[in-house]
Each structure stands twice: as structure tokens, then as C-alpha cells.
Amino acid sequence: MTSQVRRQARPSRMAQMGGLISGAAILTVILLASLLASHLIPYDPIEQNLRDTLQPPSLAHLFGTDNFGRDIFARVLHAAKLDLMIGFLCVVFPWMLGLALGGIAGYFGGLADTLIMRTVDTFTAFPFLIMVIGVIAIMGPGLFGMYVALTMAGWSIYARIVRAEVLVIKKSEYILAARSLGYGHGRILLRHVIPNVVTPTIIFAMTDMVLVILSTTSLSFLGLGVQPPTPEWGVMIAEGRGFILSAWWMVTLPGLAVVLVGVALSLFGDGIARILREGSQA
Amino acid sequence: MNIITFLRKRILQSLPVVFGILAVVFLVVRMIPGDPARLMLGIHASDAKLSALREQLGLDQPIWQQFTQFVGHAVQGELGTSLVFRRDVLEVILDRLPVTLSLVAFAVLLSVAISLPLAMLASMRQGRGADFLVRSGATLTLAMPGFWLGLNLLILFAVIFPLFPVSGYGKGLGDRIWHLFLPALTIAFSLAPILIRTLRASLIEIMSAPHVDFARTKGLPELVLIRRHVLRNGLMATITILGVNIGWLIGGSVVVETVFTLPGIGALIISSVTARDFPMIQGIALIFGGMVVVINLVTDLIYAALDPRVSYD
């Protein structure tokens, strides 16, 4: 590479590292605060307190209270671990399924490839949220239905990325060498092919995670995901919907948590993606 | 290749996808363990109702026969009878389709009106303050859930400053635009960051292209240069990005229609899920899937019409 290119890259690399570190820091703080929430805040996230309903934000109640007198800040903090876990799992499950099916399609080719890739085409033709809602309609609303639905709606892009990578890798010399040593297809696929195609899928997963968190909160908002009274950001915003005329804080403040996590994930993800991309080019 | 051959070829290419959509919609309901009729009607349904629904769904026949029957009916526009409305599914959907279509179209217009100038500003001031502001704004807006943004716009512009209506669809063109403005703006805000990011990148590429360099050396004023050489290519990029994200847009309509209680298909699918109205859910999934296929086709056509280099092949 010429020195000119390197000089251009340096400040943006610094910015990326800054983004990565601040993103990771925000996420760590949120996660820690959520895990320690019962020690940090003297309010129970679920127990009702009907003498203190719909209090505006104050020093006693940072985010105010809801229509059942529950402290909204306590609920927002408690919700973080659930929301982050759902967001993480709803990326990991489709990622694993896409990795497996895309790997099989690319490595074996032929009929398996045709069948899997035509299925991919079909699944990507549906609008994401429509697919998710359709599956939840069958599975029934709730956490389990949401996992299944987001996995079914999300795997196809991963499969497409993996297949394209496998098609290139499978022609390389070390795969031929492994074949001529007599290794079985399963071993080659798992030990030699998949580890070498993981990077681009992780880069995509990083941007995917923001959209997945937005989707899961949307589903809970629509009443199709996490069910009340469990504290979850989408659920809380849905509960505040009936009070937008009198208690704006019930809607606006829990949403700030989603925005904060989304921005932190974007910064963190962009940073990780940049590092992985440079690593795979080197 | 002329336009007719191109159309025929593209339609033939979409057929497997349409077939796949039909198969998925058909199979998903049959995946339910137990008796689908019982599940749809609930545990208190009478035997007569159950057997009537089994007959409507053809559940007493072998599965491949059920499927050919399902496809045959779907092709003729017979999507069954809604369990809630007791009316033809397609009729109910067609009643509500204009709301969703005008919402999506309005949102596309607004998002282009927001994104194009901002992306141009960012690409012309690449690496400077304005660029940084636009990009940070995009990251921030991308992290905002549509339902939350919509509710906040409602609180701000319908409750605190009552400039717009809280809900409803209105009558007559002007009234409808007024009613749809906040909902469309909400969708536009969730689409704009995606548009801005991709557009900025492609505009930067266009502006360093040899033909733009040459036009600049020729002494063409910057504004003329942008209008003649950059904007046209930028428009192409916009259409491509919109085409790719159409599914995202339609998904956005589901959430936003619920927030603003608009009588569109998006709100309908949510109420159908709650009411376990499976024929309706199947119908909506088919219509939305079909819409994506058609819009992709239209995008390709516009693309070929705008860019003389893209021949219809």
C-alpha cells in the first residue's frame, strides 16, 4: 500500500477505535447497571404502588412513574438484560442456521444447493416483519415464538453470504489437500471451510443486531413478543401509549434506552467490522 | 433486447419466487400441530363450524391436492373468507390497500426529500463538520424504533402543538395528506439513514469519476455539474436502494399504522394475529409478498428507462 493511502486511513482508524471503545463502554455500563439494578434502585420493577401513579420525572423517580405507580427507571434498567439477551440470541440463531445451510449449499452444490438457494430466494421475498408476524401467528405470541420467527426470517441473508464465500474457499489448495488426505466431508466443512468464512458473517451480524433489537422491541410493542408485566422496553412504550395526553414520560423515556443501546451497538459493531475487515485483508 | 422480451424474461424469473411464496404461506398453517380448524376457531367451536372450515381449507384431502387447490384458488384471487369479518379476504384487503399504498408512497417521497440534499451535502463536504453531523444524525436516527418516534411526533405535533391530527385517515386529498404527514414522516425517518449512508458513498464515487473531473476541468459551473452529471446518477442509486429496502418500508407500515390507528393492511395483520384469523393472515402475506415481487420488477424497469447503458437484459 502507498503511504498516501495509509495517511488517509489513520485518523479514521482512530475514530473507529474511539467508537469501538465508547460503544463497548456504554454497553458494559448498561449491562452492569441492569444486573445490579435491584441494589442500585430501591423500587421493585413489577410490584404496583397505586398511591404514586403517573408521577412526572423527579429526583425520587428519575423517569417518573407509570399508571401502576411503578418506577420507570427501575423498569428500564431491569429490562436491559432481557432486551440485550433477546437481541443477541435473535442474531446468533439465524447466524448459526445460515452458516449451516449456506455452508452445505456452497460445499456440496448440486441438488442441495438448488433447494436451499431457492428457499433463500423465497424467504427474502417476504417483507421481514410480515414473515416474523406470520410465524408468530402460528407459534403464538411470546418469547419462544419470537425466537423461532426471527430465526426463520433472518437466516437467509447469512446463508447467501456464507454460500458465496464457500464457493471461493472450496477451490483453494488446502481444501484439495484435505480431500486427498482422505478427510470426510463433515470434517472438512466444519474444521476447514466454516472457520474461514465466518468473518464476513460476523461483520454483517454486527449491523444486523441493531435492526434485530429494533424489531424485537417493535414486536413486544405490538403485543406479539414479551408480555406484560415483564419489564421490556417495547412493552413499556406500549403501556404508555394510552397516556400520551397526560404522561409523555411513559413513552419517551423508555425509548431513550433503545436509542442509546442502538447507537452503542452501531459504534461497537462498526469498530469490530473495521478490525475484522482489515484483518481478513492482511 | 426490447422491453417486451425483457418483461417476459423478468416475469419468468419471478415465477419460482411467487411459487415459493405460495408454498410457504400454504405450509406455515399446515405446520401447526393438531387440527388447524380447531386452532383457528378456538376450543369452544361447534362441530358444524369445524367441519365447515375443514372443508373450506380442504383439510380432508391429501396434502398435494390441498396445495394445488390452494394455488388454483389464489391465482383466481379467491383467498378464502375472513373468520372475523365474515367477508371475502381479498375484498377486505383491497378496501384497505389504498391507505397502505399512499402511506408508503408518501413516505418514499419524504425520505428522498430528506436524504438527497443531506447526502449531497455530506459527500461534497466529505470529512468535514457537515459530513460528520449528517453521519452522526443518521446513526442516531437509525437506532430509533419507528413506533417510539411516531409516538413522540404525536406527543410533540399533535398534543403539545396541535398542528396535526392524533389519528385517522381523513377525507379528500388535502385532508388525507394532512392526516398521513406524521405517519409518513415516521417511516421516512427510519428509511432516511439507510438512504443517506448508501447515497453518500455512491455520490462520493460519482464525484471522483473521470467524466465529472473532465466536466469540471472544462469549466462547467459546480451547480450545472451537479445537476447534469451527479444528480442523475444519484437518482439511479436512490431507486436501487429504495427497491432493495421495499420490504423494510412495508414492515414499517405495520408498526406505524398501529401507532396512528390508520385503517391499512399493516394494522389489519396485527388485529388478525390477535384474533387468529388465519385466512386473513395468509391473504395479507400473499399480497405483501406479491407486492415485493412487483415492486422489484418496476424498479428494474425504471432503472433501465433512466440509464441508457442498462439494456433490457
Image (spheres, coloured by chain):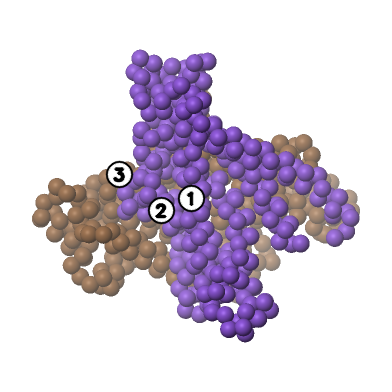
Chain colours: A purple, B brown
**In the image, B12: left or right of A9?**
left
SS assignment at label 2? helix
- In the rendered structure, the residue with mark 2 lies on which chain? A
Residue under the image location 51 percent in, 62 percent down: A98
Q: Between residue B85 and residue A71, name the one nearer to us.
A: A71
* Residue B180 in sight here: no
Structural distance between the alpha carbons of marks 2 and 3: 16 Å
Q: Crowding near pointer 3: few (<14 within 10 Å), some, many (20+)?
A: some
Q: Between residue B28 and residue B34, name the one nearer to us.
A: B34
For disc 1, the marked residue is A89
Q: Between residue B215 and residue A237, name the one nearer to us.
A: A237
Q: Return the x and y of residue A232 as percentages of the image width and height.
A: 43, 36
Q: Which mark is residue A149?
A: 2
Q: Amino acid at mark 2?
A: Ala
Q: Quadrant of the N terminus of chain A?
A: bottom right
Which quadrant would residue A199 be assigned to in this image?
bottom right
For disc 3, the marked residue is B274
Q: Return the x and y of residue A189 as percentages of the image width and height.
A: 56, 72
Residue under the image location 21 percent in, 65 percent down: B58
SS assignment at label 3? helix
Q: Crowding near pointer 2: few (<14 within 10 Å), some, many (20+)?
A: many
Q: Return the x and y of residue B253 as percentages of the image width and height.
A: 45, 44
SS assignment at label 1? helix
